Image (cartoon, rainbow, N blue to C red):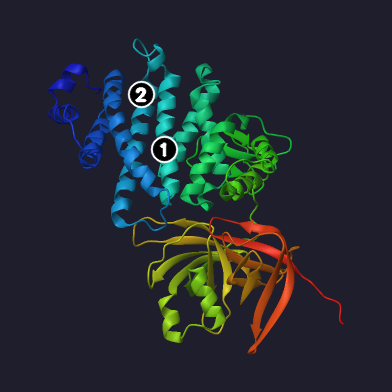
Amino acid sequence: MPLDETQLIASPAMDEVLDWLGSKSGDPLDDLIPLRRHLRTVISLSLQPRVLMRLLDLFEPRVARIHALVFPLLLDASTPLPRNLRVLSQSLVDLHGQLAEGFMYVVGHAVGEGFQRPKRRRDTLAARALHSLRLQYELSLRIASGTPPGFWKQINSLLVNQQTTEHFLDSPTLQLLHLVLAMHAAQAEALTPREQEFLWRHAEQLAAQVELTTALPKKIECWLWVDTHDERPPTPANRRAPPSADGLLFYTCHTLGVVTQASLDGLTAPRNFRNVLHHAARRWLNPPQRRHNRRRGNYRVEVCPRLSSLWSLLHGDLSAAASKQVTNEWQVMNDSPAGYAAMHIAGNMPNLLSGSVIGIRRDAKEPWSLCMVRWVRSENSEHLEMGLEVLAPYADAVRIAIASRPAAPIPALLLPPLNGTNRGETLLTERGVYETGRIALMHEKAGKLQVVECQTQPLVTQTSSIELFEFERIQHPAH
């Protein structure tokens, strides 16, 4: 039975909560442990909506103080996070989830007097719930922990409400829902925390361009569908066809993608973030299909997680003993011709970023395949998983000389043409090397140095870590 306000005052548990809420702390991080405990207590009780609302009004600013301290620390973090930062971040994820749960309870029971005023209307309360969910999602992406349990169940519940409640039309709730749906469609887990930050701000300006409907679209290729009775995230229709069921919603970010793509040429944003918008625009315009079925894997592989170390291995600069210091062992969970999903099992725990390039091979008899890290996931400081896209089955360590950089030749990896695509020979370097013009390609073979003049072609791929570009070898006429 719900507690009334008299019962609330008489409750020993609530007396402790109220005493703590009335206290002040100089350091917001000192609030973390008691805040989690007391908020959990409040959420677990079936309080009257108005009573719970008053308590949430007091808890929300305390959660915001901790968020303001912890969130910026994650901007340049790699995965896995240091243990202390992981504990702080995961606690903050839980706090946002508890706040959202509390607001959702009030939304579901907000009837009668006291909930008609603007600050207490159901649409306003739903927007507060969704604001907490949005922060939870943004934080989970930044720490690569995966979507929190129950997150999409709550989002799908709000999607149902926005379709059936008149107040939600053109409301802050609908704008936030569009934003979360757009970020999911953009596959933001493939970006670094700083790139994610930029994309959130960009998507905020264009969230109104997301189209949402209950009717099955005629051309469904660029749409995603949501089963609002389910707990699963939206699914691209070109990957899995929507079922014949009640409660389906469909949305597309195609217009958002068109606007983003059109703005790339005249973009005034830093060059560092052009690849972010290109990444998002491609996925908003056409959600990627899975080209190959994944096969369950259960075998070990050797991984070299650093591009500089991989170059040294391919160039033959490291002894067998030294090579073991720059590699580690992983377990392949599933694979396909296009990529892998793997989990770290032995060796030094590397720090990974989405968009970096690693080397992978089954054993020393095989060449190093080059793969791009498409996503990373970590449940704790001792756990690390990654998804990989194959870039090339092998590569050669070379150097390139650029006239504008006369100091020393720059290490690069020479990748062969990729079968089944129009991609020719490519060079892979660290970020910041590529520029248009002529370069000298220096390739050592059998103890001999071959130098070829080349013309760079447009970038194939650019991330926060690497640049991959094609080139043409310049053939000079014989004298």
Q: Position of residue 375 (x, y in %)?
A: 51, 56
Q: Is residue 282 above or below residue 26?
A: below
- Left or right placement of residue 199 versus residue 60 in this view: right
The numbered disc on residue 135 is: 1
Q: Position of residue 436 (x, y in %)?
A: 70, 59
Q: Position of residue 103 (x, y in %)?
A: 36, 27
Q: Is residue 133 above or below residue 372?
A: above
Residue drawn 53% across the image and 47% down it: 188
Residue drawn 56% across the image and 60% down it: 431
The quadrant of the image that shows the C terminus is: bottom right
The three-letter code of the residue at mark 2 reads: Val
The three-letter code of the residue at mark 1 reads: Leu
Q: Quadrant of residue 52?
A: top left
Instruction: Say which of marks 1 and 2 sits in front.
Output: 1
Q: Position of residue 434 (x, y in %)?
A: 63, 61
Residue that label 2 marks = 106
Q: Is residue 133 above or below residue 308?
A: above
The quadrant of the image that shows the N terminus is: top left
Disc 2 element: helix
Q: In this orientation, does residue 6 appear?
A: yes
Question: Of the residues under marks 1 and 2, which one precedes in the sequence?
Answer: 2
Report the front residue among 245 and 311.
311
Q: In this orientation, does residue 362 appear?
A: no
Pointer 2: residues within 10 angstroms few (<14), some, or many (20+)?
A: many
Disc 1 element: helix
Residue drawn 60% across the image and 39% down it: 225
- Left or right placement of residue 460 versus residue 56 in this view: right
